[in-house]
Image (tube, rainbow, N blue to C red):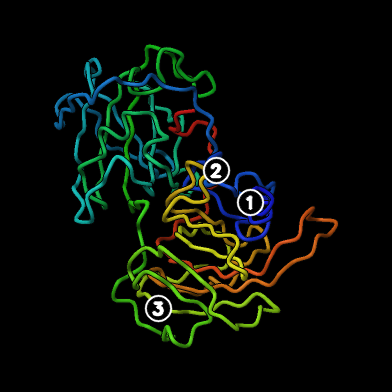
Amino acid sequence: MRKLLSAALAASLAFALSACSDDDATPAASSAAATSTVSAGATPSATASSDPDVVVSSDGMPTLDTSDEDNPVLKFPDTAAPDGLQVSVVSEGDGRVISGDDCVIVDYVGQVWGDSTPFDSSFTRGAAAGFWLKNLVSGWKYTLEGHHVGSKVIISLPPEYGYGSSGNDSAGISGTDTIAFYIEVHDALSQDSSGQDDASVEIQSSDLPVTITGDIGSPVTKLAVKDGEAEPKEVTTKLIAKGTGAEVPSKNAIVYLNYAAVSWDGDYEENSWLGTPEEYTDFAGPQALEMGANSTIFDGLAGVPVGSRVLVLVPAQEASDDTTTSTPAMAVVVDVLAISTEAPSASASPTDD
């Protein structure tokens, strides 16, 4: 029964949700309607047995230049690539410190050392992308962790911390190529990321049909429907606490969120803060929703500011020609964490699979 409800939830609750580019780790990924921010088209890289030394220096590193289309590109020196991992800090941000376990929202351009033509560029696509650092070629984690959100860096990755000895044929990367990236870090989200702790309360807890365990600005650890509350008859979005960030667009944008959900009878729970249900062992942390891509229960997030907490009430659905199972009425609490522009698939993203 639990697996049946999980599949139903993937088709209804998480209709257009996917992890921060963790395509096969969430219930949403089992739905044909699920979307992801980028594709994972890279050949696996080698796995380092221990954390390497990282040199922080601009010596011998590429410099920032612009293409004919005014997009950032790297200009390489007439010298060999560094032997190991190296970071050149263009500017250090003043946001939170980046952890190797974070989901980062970035713009970036990647080039083979000495090659003036990028093999991948979010700047060219006009779309920032979200990645779990654990899913990227390992050099990203080692060179980004410890820096701050808002940082702009150039990194140099030898093959063992890039695409490995197999390289990436589709991107023109051989197994002996050093690759370099220019990266602008717009945001970094952790599994327990939540909305603003100073969000303005719009609905008092006593007036909600649910009991929420978890203060504004903190993870929701338990969600329950109050006794005697009537099931919703239509999808309804209620703003519990209003943040001060940018408003979620109705289309052409990716919104990142954490959420907790419970069926009206309390028999089923799902929680991205906690990574439950347990059969999806990697289902944890911020989820990425492409606004306007499909008609979903999260359409009501349009206009909601980043930093907000929202309650979405979902009516029960009977099985139909489009769905093979019925779904129970649900209550969903959502914290809106961040927004990026729409991110089309990338043929050579730095993902490690």
Numbered tag placed on residue 277 in the rendering: none
The residue wearing badge 2 is: 279
Locate residue 106, reporting x and y percent. Answer: 37, 47
For the residues labelled 1 and 3, the Cα–Cα distance comes to: 34 Å
Relative to the observer, which residue lies in front, 18 or 186? 18
Please state if 74 lies on the left or on the right of 212 as rendered.
left
Q: Nearer the viewer, residue 348 or 37?
A: 37
C-alpha separation, residue under disc 3 versus residue under disc 2: 33 Å
Q: Position of residue 206 (x, y in %)?
A: 44, 87
Q: Say which label, 3 or 2, has the lower sequence index.
A: 3
Q: Is residue 94 left or right of residue 101?
A: left
Q: Is mark 3 on a helix, strand or loop?
A: strand
The residue wearing badge 1 is: 2
Report the residue at 39% width, 70% height from top.
213
Q: Which residue is drawn at 58% across and 66% down?
A: 266
Q: Which amino acid does label 2 sit on?
A: Glu
Residue at which label 3 appears: 242
